[in-house]
Amino acid sequence: MSAKKAKDFKNTSDPAALEILEQIEDKGYDTAFQRYLDQQPQCNYGSTGVCCRICLNGPCRITKKAPKGVCGATAYTIVARGIARAVAGGCSAHSDHGRHVAETLLEVAEGHAKDYKITDSDKLKRVADRVGISYEGKDDNTLAAEVAKLALEDFGTYKGVPPVWLSTTITEGRMKKFNECNILPANINGSVVEILHQTHIGVDADPVNIIFGALKTALCDYTGMHIATDLTDVLFGTPKPVKSEANMGVIDPEMVNLVVHGHNPLLSEMVVKAAKEMKADAEAAGAKGVKCMGICCTGNEVLMRQGVPIVTSYASQELIMMTGAIDAYVVDVQCIMPGLRAVSECFHTRIITTSSISKIPGSYHIAYNEKYAMENAKDVVRTAIAAYKERKPGVVNIPKVVKDVIAGFSFEAMMDIFASVNKENPIRVLNDAIMEGQVKGVALMAGCNNLKAKQDDGHNTIAKELAKNNVFVVATGCAAQSYAKEGLLSSAAIDEYAGDGLKAFLKKLSDASGVELPLVFHMGSCVDNSRCYDLATAMANDMGVDVPRIPYVGSAPEAMSEKAVSIGSWVVALGLPCHVGVWPPIEGSPLVNDVAQLIAHDVYGGFFYFETDPNIAAEKLLYHLDYRAWKLKVQKATAEKLGTDLIHLW
Ligand code: SF4
Ligand code: MSK
């Protein structure tokens, strides 16, 4: 336990997290908020990207006195290589997740994973159709095996054509652009290998070429994410609007409280099922049942499909244990702080790791295997029930903060709602609202919490400002969890925060569909940013333009992980402005910075901009939406007047 006490380690705007941090002020518990302060000052060479550890001549750092590394690499090469390797890390994480889902679907189809089944046969057919597999006369298992095998080919088979999950989900214009720029990847694994090779000592020194290589890898990140989304829907169902709750008030002192955390829903879906089946075991231990709740994207996955509540988000993952009422924490992969273990030592909480590639020394390990998924899930629940018996009621103190949530907005669910207004062409409902000026455009709010920023503040400030200015806001990942905790995923928030145009638009949709709608639309986990991009593709195709022309922006106000770097990179390559609220390590090279913020726009139509002040960031996002909408309207009017097609340049 850290004995150090910082002046102010309560860097959060989440009221429940704040309450816990205030309670523990003098207790010396180890938290990420405190450890961030312990790390100050952080290394300026690392922060600006000019520290290189790629070979054993290093580490080299660029200074006025030493402007080149031992090998002669200058700042621009070192910075570009560092970012490219971050993209490779993000791509690997998302894609390995997607590969795991594809392999499991194949196991299910071949009868080797008896606890799973194909839940969404319609989605399976839609995906098959899109990727060019005929479904006529085939049963679900035969079709699923073909789809899973094709998906697995996108990872590693050289076929001389780009990955199918890329080429069949983006616009023709984007495919042409990537072809012209020579960044169409052959397959996911090859692309990660190539970028790691390209950035090896003594290979590529050209920063622009390295960044183009990174974008190629980022397109593979998108591909892996889309595979993960599609095939998870096939296995567990495509999300539909669902009601739930969020924040620490969902912890129930009378239940066994079991947290699912990480990203891959293969086990957490089973844990939720097992928890229901094992109610009697929990009752025998003196509890009323087992209550599951989620953190990070495993949490988002089971919220979207099962309505499992969100207990907190990334930055405050350790704090919930300090309520004294969390019995077990089952984790899979990604965004799991090793620090969880130290906190659990002070409580009765069991930390259970489940993946062979994600272990924490000193914690429990239940080796997940899809062939025995339900048995593994029951072991997890049994461990939680055993821990519950050791809970000390005297130390239980749960912040009474809880908000209503409406989630479950897959792309398909969104189209069903739009179809209640225009059955023939659902996406036209959104496009018309934009062209008529009722809605300013679409903003995808994504990404993490970052301990450098006040937790949730950037997410909430920007989303409220956008909604006030009639922007249709969709969200994923920890951004969506921030909105869940702030009450923005509720219909009550529409009255409080939406501008008149957005209010009227949402009312029209709600009245026509009979579905209660929230202010912000939760579209899922990090990999489900693919759903948000499907929305952009549909808008562009319907408008008859490429994505760089549509009023659609992305923002990651508290980006943290390599996955966020990778997502941001494909968002830019795929044609959208992308705000990031934390400076990535590129300031050490003005050239790389200019490529990200300026030149990317000239080539791809999308670009990064870095802004740490959420109010200024919101202003700029609104500007970009206004500019794109204005240009589109002027060009559309001109094209109509002259009887020509819309021009395709931006
Ligand atoms: Fe230094 Fe070059 Fe090795 Fe990097 S690759 S550590 S700059 S010698
Ligand atoms: S969980 S990647 S902290 S969004 Fe997807 Fe949150 Fe970022 Fe992890």
Image (tube, rainbow, N blue to C red):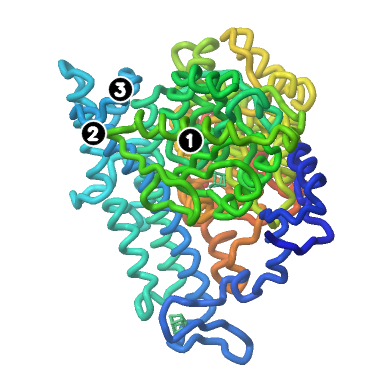
555 up-or-down from 124: above or below? below
Q: Residue 480 appears at what percent x and percent y?
A: 61, 35
Which residue is tagged 3?
A: 118
Measure how far apart labels 2 and 3 are at the Cα level: 11 Å
Q: Residue 117 appears at what percent x and percent y?
A: 30, 23
Which of marks 3 and 1 precedes in the sequence? 3
What residue appears at the point 57 percent right and 90 percent down from the top-left corner? 66
Which residue is tagged 2?
A: 106
Q: Amino acid at mark 2?
A: Leu
Dividing the image into four quarters, tell me where ligand 1 lies: bottom left
Task: Give whichever of 91, 173 is nearer the camera.
Answer: 91
Which of marks 1 and 2 precedes in the sequence? 2
What residue appears at the point 42 percent right and 60 percent down from the top-left corner? 214
Which of marks 3 and 2 precedes in the sequence? 2
Which quarter of the image is occupied by the N terminus?
A: bottom right
Q: Residues within 10 Å of mark 1 (few under 14, many from 20)?
A: many
Q: Quadrant of residue 116?
A: top left
Q: Nearer the viewer, mark 1 or mark 3?
A: 1
What residue appears at the point 78 percent right and 38 percent down from the top-left corner? 15
Q: Which mark is residue 383?
A: 1
What residue appears at the point 45 percent right and 43 percent down from the top-left corner? 332
